[in-house]
Image (cartoon, coloured by chain):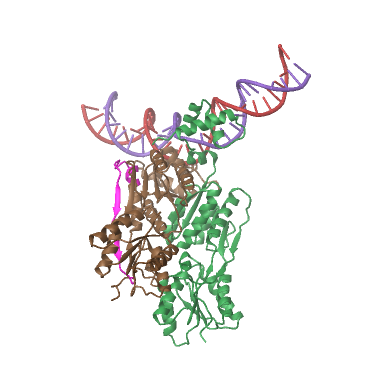
Chain colours: A green, B brown, C red, D purple
Amino acid sequence: MARPTMEDVAELAGVSRALVSLVMRGSPKVSNHRRDAVLAAAAQLGYTPHQMARSLASRTSTVLGVMVSDLRNSFFAEVVEGIDAAARASGFEMVLNTGGRSPARERAALRSLLSFRPAGVVLLSPVLPTSAITEASAHSPVVLVSRTTRLAAVDTVNDDGATGATLAVEHLVSLGHKRIVHFDGNGASVAAARRQGYVSAMKRHGLSPWVVPSEHTDVAGAKAVRSVWDGPDAPPTAIVAGNDFNAVGAISALEELGLRVPRDVSVVGYDNTSLAALRHVSLTTIDQPRAELGRLAAEALLERVRGERTEPVRHLLQPSLVVRATTAGPAA
Amino acid sequence: MARPTMEDVAELAGVSRALVSLVMRGSPKVSNHRRDAVLAAAAQLGYTPHQMARSLASRTSTVLGVMVSDLRNSFFAEVVEGIDAAARASGFEMVLNTGGRSPARERAALRSLLSFRPAGVVLLSPVLPTSAITEASAHSPVVLVSRTTRLAAVDTVNDDGATGATLAVEHLVSLGHKRIVHFDGNGASVAAARRQGYVSAMKRHGLSPWVVPSEHTDVAGAKAVRSVWDGPDAPPTAIVAGNDFNAVGAISALEELGLRVPRDVSVVGYDNTSLAALRHVSLTTIDQPRAELGRLAAEALLERVRGERTEPVRHLLQPSLVVRATTAGPAA
DNA sequence: CTACACGATTAGCGCGCTCCAACGAATAGA
DNA sequence: TCTATTCGTTGGAGCGCGCTAATCGTGTAG
């Protein structure tokens, strides 16, 4: 298990340790002769530079700390993939943690990440209090994804939920719908923007907004449908769900009520998760560019690391409408 | 950004650096008097030990390297969550990578992980050649998840795919099915065990096995259904799909053919992903204990790290049947 | 043949920490 | 009183590497 060190490579190649260091860092001021000898020796020993020693000596880091609330949520998993791709392209690695949507656990996870003295930290939809984020930003560049802040030292990357919800409403209105209900995401940090986008789009078209409290789960979506159809009001002809899971739950409940989608009721989701793309679901939804969110988060950190920028950035990505099989004109 | 060091804490507390080190590592041989002074100084400066310096000096590591082929696959994401939980419980961190099912990329990812001199490495369903795994195992303990090996230096954690497929067949047979087809996962490393379990279970019941080549995607599942129903043979009354995605694709294609599930055809998936649990899908499937897979992988590494074991372990987890709404007796 | 320049190479310090040998002071035993 | 022993504490070496300043060797000009 004892891996070789630079010293071993230097000895085998018959050069000094410093020269091996130069070769490993790709310095141009090494003769080809020596370079080949060093590379051959390194290959023979199976030598790879020790990242930790390297970053200790160079006082730099090739680590990006990433804290994600819940990896099982495919939305976050795909953002992480985006971060990974961007990090890899620049020679960085991810140290990854989960916070479980608990402030205490997130705090511990963040501390743990910072103990690696990372080049930067990405926080995916954290529930941490602002004070903890402020403190972290004193030690390391911080990027927030799916959460906004006014902190000047912190970058943010979000999708424009208001525009996304507006797209959903516009689509339904153009199909002829007038009674459109929104299932609100309640606690979720992205819910407010979506709700606000829905409300103002409705008003813009002279329609009365109808917001039903719900959650970002399929169970909650089903429950919201039952509460609406059990209620005293004439039922809507279309639903703008809080996210895809919520939409799928709503569709199940509608079918159990004997209603057909989209013949009787149209449904629009949000996120365009892989679930929505399944032909069995084939959900009309709002696409959030997840990999792009991740990429921009990583890029934002790298810009800070390279000292290219000190001003905060506020990326607001534009979502897009993906029309599939759950929307159609209202029943005559 | 310049974080305080042990030296700073020592100076503020009026003690030596070595004493601060002892306090940070929770040594009992420190007087309460001094300990309090050190902790107070550390708190005042916001000091946290530098993990990389620590592991360099101690020649130990608190890093677990994790390479996952594709995080977007929720199966892997959930295994990673299991690893994370176990690692956190023992004070370890994950350095995480993706290999993208490409041998070249996986090789680079593995090298990158090893450059951190991790305590151990977890490879989730790698497509790497055995030689690369052998080489890695010379440098660090290695655990393979969802892939088998004969390498004595490498631990493995798998679910018992043969038993899982057998459970599916038994369930269908007990419902009265006789014509049961299996959609094979082809390239997937777990496919062979499932196929073999299916075949021997069928034979055990005096039924003739019928294996259709497919893939672990919903598109492939749909295609397999069409090829079977377009074929010359009398169609089956039940399908044992390669995994949940394959099953969902099959169900869509069946419905497009005017067949009802489970009235006309029963379908069993594999993995019990969150998809299967959605009420809109409500798929009968084989549950693979994913978090447990992850936990055992982490544990296996930690046992090696702690020197508690040098023999390889071969964990084979028992899957279980989850009956939902896609299976019933065959049509009379 | 000497002086000089310049590129290739090396010695050695320090990154933040762990660990070990060794220290002084206090207590115990003789 | 003197020697052991224990306990809490400290100095210093060294983990594997990056980096700066100094050194070496070679070719060119004078």
Q: Nearer the viewer, residue A244 or A196?
A: A244
Quadrant assignment for the C terminus of chain B: bottom left
Q: Is residue A35 visible?
A: yes
Q: Quadrant of residue B201?
A: bottom left
Q: Is residue A126 visible?
A: no
Residue B258 location (% of width, % of height)? 40, 75
Q: Is residue A240 above or below residue A133?
A: below
Residue B309 location (% of width, % of height)? 29, 42
Q: Nearer the viewer, residue A56 or B164?
A: B164
Residue B207 location (% of width, % of height)? 26, 63
**Residue B146 covered by magenta stretch:** no
Q: Nearer the viewer, residue B204 or A110?
A: B204
Q: Is residue A36 above or below residue A216?
A: above
Give the side of residue B113 with respect to residue B86, left or right.
right
Give the side of residue B134 with respect to residue A67, left or right.
left
How many tags in the picture? 0
What residue do we see at 29% from left, 42% from top? B311
Q: Which residues are magenta?
A: B301-326
Give the side of residue D6 with respect to residue A29, left or right.
left
Q: Is residue A79 above or below residue A187?
A: above
Give the side of residue B51 with respect to residue B173, left or right.
right
**Residue B319 covered by magenta stretch:** yes
Residue A207 location (% of width, % of height)? 57, 83
